[in-house]
Amino acid sequence: MRRPEPRSPAYAAGPPTLADVADLAGVSRQTVSNALNNPDLLRADTLERVQAAVAELGYTPNRAARNLRTRSSQLIGMRFVPGQEGTANAAMDRFVHSLVETSREAGYHVLLFAGHGTDALAGYDDLLRSTAVDAFVVTDTFLGNPQTTWLEDRGAPFVAFGRPWDQPEASHPWVDVDGAAGVAAATEHLLGHGHSRVAWIGWRKDSRIGEDRRSGWTRAMHAAGLSTSGLASRTEDTVASGRDAAAVLLDEAGATAFACASDTLAMGVLHTLAERGLVPGRDVAVIGFDDSQVAQVVPGGLTSVRQPLEQVAVEIVAALSGLLAHPPTSTPNVLLAPTLAVRASG
Amino acid sequence: MRRPEPRSPAYAAGPPTLADVADLAGVSRQTVSNALNNPDLLRADTLERVQAAVAELGYTPNRAARNLRTRSSQLIGMRFVPGQEGTANAAMDRFVHSLVETSREAGYHVLLFAGHGTDALAGYDDLLRSTAVDAFVVTDTFLGNPQTTWLEDRGAPFVAFGRPWDQPEASHPWVDVDGAAGVAAATEHLLGHGHSRVAWIGWRKDSRIGEDRRSGWTRAMHAAGLSTSGLASRTEDTVASGRDAAAVLLDEAGATAFACASDTLAMGVLHTLAERGLVPGRDVAVIGFDDSQVAQVVPGGLTSVRQPLEQVAVEIVAALSGLLAHPPTSTPNVLLAPTLAVRASG
DNA sequence: ATCATGGTTTGGAACGTTCAAGTAGTCGGA
DNA sequence: TCCGACTACTTGAACGTTCCAAACCATGAT
């Protein structure tokens, strides 16, 4: 007997433990443990007996005890950054769900935490030192974000969604989407539909992601023997900025099509077209980036570059599993190609 | 000495433990524990000494060990249901962030899990029996959803976002948004702008949430002495359904304004208006529900009922904290009033 | 001088699991 | 018959924390 007094059902408190199962099956605790973690070690009939006892009691291993002993939590931490109000970039939603789903298949759960700026590092630090999570998924790897460097310095296992743009010396695994290829495909799509004055509306120059996407546009334009001069605009990621930029490009550059760094900017273009009575897709073509819900439901529909977020999640979890394996195995960094969700606007 | 051999820095592995801090401060483990959890019990100078040692070593309590001993994980489980593709209802994003933020302030983290249908119950069951989470937040309390009943039967602590529509005997705490009041406010807003033919486009009759929102419309119409007959449509929550319903209501009921059960349906109305060259807000008024990103960035902007999700999160965490307190305290169920985000469409 | 008092501090045990080492039992070959 | 090697299972310890009961120590009252 494991306890001084066997608990009568009436006083039963808490879920059954390994020892309860062991008593019922007439084996030792360790054998039960092995039945769950290394079934190969048991004789067939013993295994069966233990499994029957497990089923009868409805036993599930206590997470805390297992975590303590194995020094792992089967948890993956991720800072949850919500889509900004007034923008169309709610890709997070889709990505998080894919990540949760894929992690489950690999035996992990996803733990969310918050915090902005330096506060964010505090969140990482806390979870790391209390050994609350086994690893992190880092999603915002934009310019000068100290997170990845900080985590690397600490030897914390993590996988980044996003390339280490500004850190040639970075050695952490990452998965990213080839934004340039996506925009190039979008631009080629527009060129293929007869447009030659394809304008670009993107973000300010200090955004590496923005510059990468822009490079897809220039590449496709130059490959078609077209000049890009006067056809590009760099601005804030807001609808109003997109609208203003579109007005200028229509008037001063004779643009007939737009490739945009985001759906938010593309929506700005649609504003301008609506104001002028121009029909998207017929008079002027527009392509956004992210295939947000906005792109999907806006009247007419907005053609948009769609990131393969489900696949990103799969690759990230694969990399994480490698990192956390014994011994750790490293996976190659992955750059995935986006697809084009074609709708009426382009 | 806690270990046979004190670890030299070169061989140091893993974060410092309570015993390390105790050694450094020259007190017992228990005193360090008290310094962290019940500082009042310590003499001022002892407390200071311990805190200095904690700071010097950068000690953070090991979560797994604490969880094991206290039988609590400081984790709140939530099934993550992503917004459907092709709809505009990405309210989840905002809610999750608020919940994460508020939970943190109360000392909890949010753990996500997936699973659909019966699979969902398996997710709850697993986390519950492995004592991986202290409580749940249940978000989809629609018709016939077995989750709440199942959890109640098992005595699992949880708070629902959503009323127990079909379970008068339900006794769990819940927080909800008064959809009827929101739609009533929307309808009154439209009436106040001179409309008398205000139509309703909602969901099928088996949606209790949909019927609740609809009742806000009828209430406001009747209060203004107006008939609702012929002015209502019940359909699927898709853009196409909203578009079709709007066409019918315009043609056959002479509707001049629309109140909708969702932004998705409202976007459908905008489709129809665009097809007919009607300007939202000038020719025909439209109000949606959820204040999604779509409503915010669509050209002209879509007026929409906005749920106070931040406050919902606060109330939910308050209820959870009560549930998990020793002894548990029950909080009253809360029904929050939404607001109207007014834009050009209405 | 002794004793109760109350504020501080301590040592041992316990939470439920897995690791490391060990003990039977079995089989085949010398 | 004995040994080595292998299989199947068991035992005690350990992970790092908090609970519990007991010990310590001033202080003032008896």
Image (cartoon, coloured by chain):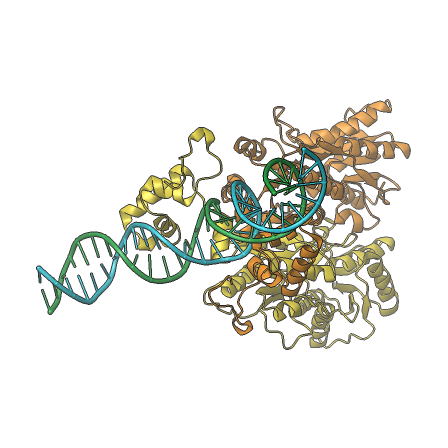
Chain colours: A orange, B yellow, C cyan, D green
Residue drawn at the location 56% of the way across and 59% of the way down? A17
Q: From the viewer's perspective, is residue B129 above or below residue A72? A: below
Residue drawn at the location 53% of the way across and 67% of the way down? A13
Q: Position of residue B331 (x, y in %)?
A: 51, 69
Residue drawn at the location 61% of the way across and 31% of the way down? A143
Looking at the image, which is closer to me, A233 or A90?
Answer: A90
Q: Is residue B114 visible?
A: yes
Q: Quadrant of the N terminus of chain B?
A: top left
Counting every numbered tag in the picture gives: 0
Looking at the image, which is closer to me, B129 or A58?
Answer: A58
Q: From the viewer's perspective, is residue A297 above or below residue A59? A: above
Q: From the viewer's perspective, is residue A172 above or below residue A317? A: above
Q: Quadrant of the C terminus of chain B?
A: bottom right
Q: Is residue B111 visible?
A: no
Q: Position of residue A233 (x, y in %)?
A: 72, 31
Tell me which corner region of the image, top left, top right, bottom left or bottom right, holds residue B291.
Answer: bottom right
Q: Position of residue C21 (x, y in %)?
A: 52, 41
Q: Position of residue A299 (x, y in %)?
A: 82, 51
Q: Is residue B56 left or right of residue B307?
A: left
Tell me which corner region of the image, top left, top right, bottom left or bottom right, holds residue A306.
Answer: top right
Looking at the image, which is closer to me, B168 or A249?
Answer: B168
